[in-house]
Image (spheres, helix red, strand yellow):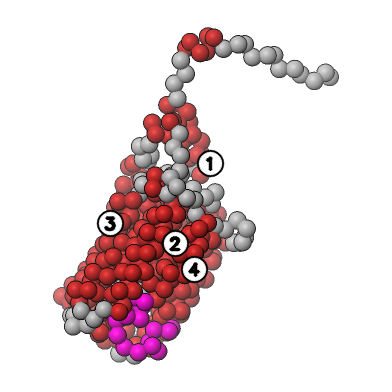
């Protein structure tokens, strides 16, 4: 399914490095709460600041990756992630930790922007995305299994993200260097296509990610306080859940476009809403594990199809980056929103509110997915738009010599 020769592994690695911070959000927020003089709400706010910084990088760089150059921009993002998260892991003063987290978040967003732009230009962006989600799920699962055994403190999960950026750095040598040349016709047709469905998709993904990460940001506290589990047990549940996500993404990669995009996106969102309600109301290990495992199985499946849908809106990857950044913006608000909702109304009520919100946004998400044409049709339309911009003077047409008659073979 994932042929080694055809899979762009540098992009997969860059995707993994960029997405690792959101995947480790529960343990990052939980460790900030327990390892620093911060309240749960303040720790959630720091997590939101990390993801907000990541989202801002995507919005700033959505249309600049080709102009700056993929290799240089990827290395810049990985360097920020290394020094930002690494510095935050070693620091003990709250302002220094927050500054490092902000720098690291911008680095993660930069790496994600480069990866999303280059993946959108691949012949099968959905397949590459599923491989990237497999990588980040496996790595995050390993971190969740390892961190509880490394002692207390806020630094371990942040150090894991920094070391991942360091490990990915050598692979950037296989990315294109320098700015990509832009033909004259492309400059004339530089407007982002399919604006209405793109804006609807971006707005929906902001709300979709907000709901997901409102729960994800407080899942650790649900397990520890409401379900009365130990940190090691909660970490094991998260690792199993991310392992189930690996199976889900593998299945999505095997199915590919056979089910279309509307059913996985719309139907998957409805099922995720039910999982969130179950997980938020958990008071024992069985219910907590059931909700988290089912939810993490479905989440990357739906996300892979959404990223593929965004990539189909623009072959240059601009909608993929913008939709991803809108998703990061919702992700950024998630920990703080989840902390405030749970503090005011309790975890079960928070889960019910989030589930209803997901059911509402499932409708426009499905509508956008139903309105998309096949990738081949989209490419033909975009090529036609570019060709129409090219102007051919009449003089050159009149002066051109007549084409020789085509010789037909004798019968």
Q: Residue at x 35, y 81 (%)?
A: 156
Q: Which mark is first along the chain, 2 or 4? A: 2
Which residues are the magenta region? 145-159
Asked whether disc 3 touches disc 1, contact meaning CB atoms under 8 Å apart, the reply is no
Q: Which mark is first along the chain, 4 or 1? A: 4
Q: Residues within 10 Å of mark 3 (few under 14, many from 20)?
A: some
The answer to whether any part of residue 23 appears in the image is no
**Residue 153 falls inside the magenta stretch:** yes
What kind of element bears circle 1? Answer: helix
- Whole-Å distance between the Cαs marked 1 and 4? 28 Å
Q: Residues within 10 Å of mark 4 (few under 14, many from 20)?
A: many
What kind of element bears circle 3? Answer: helix
Read off the residue under disc 3.
Answer: 56
Q: Which mark is first along the chain, 2 or 1? A: 2
Q: Which label is found at residue 135?
A: 4
Q: Which label is found at residue 376?
A: 1
Residue 92 in the image: x percent, y percent? Answer: 24, 81
Residue 288 in the image: x percent, y percent? Answer: 36, 82
């Amino acid at each position: 399914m994932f042929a080694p020769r055809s899979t762009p592994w540098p992009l997969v690695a860059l995707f993994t490095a960029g997405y690792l911070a959101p995947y480790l959000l529960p343990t990052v927020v939980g460790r900030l709460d327990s390892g620093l003089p911060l309240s749960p709400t303040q720790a959630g706010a720091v997590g939101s600041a990390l993801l907000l910084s990541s989202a801002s990088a995507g919005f700033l760089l959505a249309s600049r990756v080709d102009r700056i150059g993929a290799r240089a921009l990827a290395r810049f993002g990985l360097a920020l992630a290394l020094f930002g998260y690494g510095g935050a892991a070693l620091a003990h003063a709250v302002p220094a930790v927050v500054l490092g987290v902000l720098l690291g978040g911008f680095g993660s967003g930069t790496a994600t922007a480069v990866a999303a732009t280059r993946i959108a230009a691949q012949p099968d962006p959905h397949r590459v995305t599923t491989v990237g989600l497999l990588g980040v799920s496996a790595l995050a699962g390993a971190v969740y299994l390892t961190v509880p055994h490394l002692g207390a403190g806020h630094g371990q999960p942040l150090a894991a993200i920094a070391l991942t950026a360091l490990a990915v750095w050598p692979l950037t040598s296989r990315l294109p260097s320098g700015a990509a040349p832009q033909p004259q016709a492309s400059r004339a047709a530089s407007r982002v296509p399919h604006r209405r469905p793109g804006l609807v998709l971006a707005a929906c993904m902001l709300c979709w990610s907000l709901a997901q990460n409102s729960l994800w940001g407080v899942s650790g506290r649900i397990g520890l306080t409401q379900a009365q589990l130990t940190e090691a047990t909660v970490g094991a549940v998260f690792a199993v859940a991310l392992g189930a996500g690996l199976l889900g993404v593998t299945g999505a990669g095997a199915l590919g476009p056979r089910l279309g995009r509307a059913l996985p996106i719309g139907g998957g969102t409805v099922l995720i809403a039910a999982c969130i309600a179950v997980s938020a109301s958990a008071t024992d290990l069985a219910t907590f594990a059931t909700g988290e495992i089912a939810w993490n199985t479905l989440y990357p499946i739906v996300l892979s199809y959404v990223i593929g849908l965004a990539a189909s809106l623009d072959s240059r990857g601009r909608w993929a980056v913008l939709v991803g950044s809108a998703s990061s913006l919702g992700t950024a608000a998630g920990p703080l929103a989840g902390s405030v909702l749970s503090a005011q109304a309790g975890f079960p009520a928070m889960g019910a509110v989030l589930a209803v919100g997901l059911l509402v946004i499932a409708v426009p998400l499905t509508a956008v997915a139903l309105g998309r044409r096949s990738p081949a049709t989209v490419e033909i339309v975009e090529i036609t738009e570019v060709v129409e911009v090219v102007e051919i003077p009449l003089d050159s047409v009149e002066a051109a010599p007549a084409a020789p008659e085509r010789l037909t073979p004798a019968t």
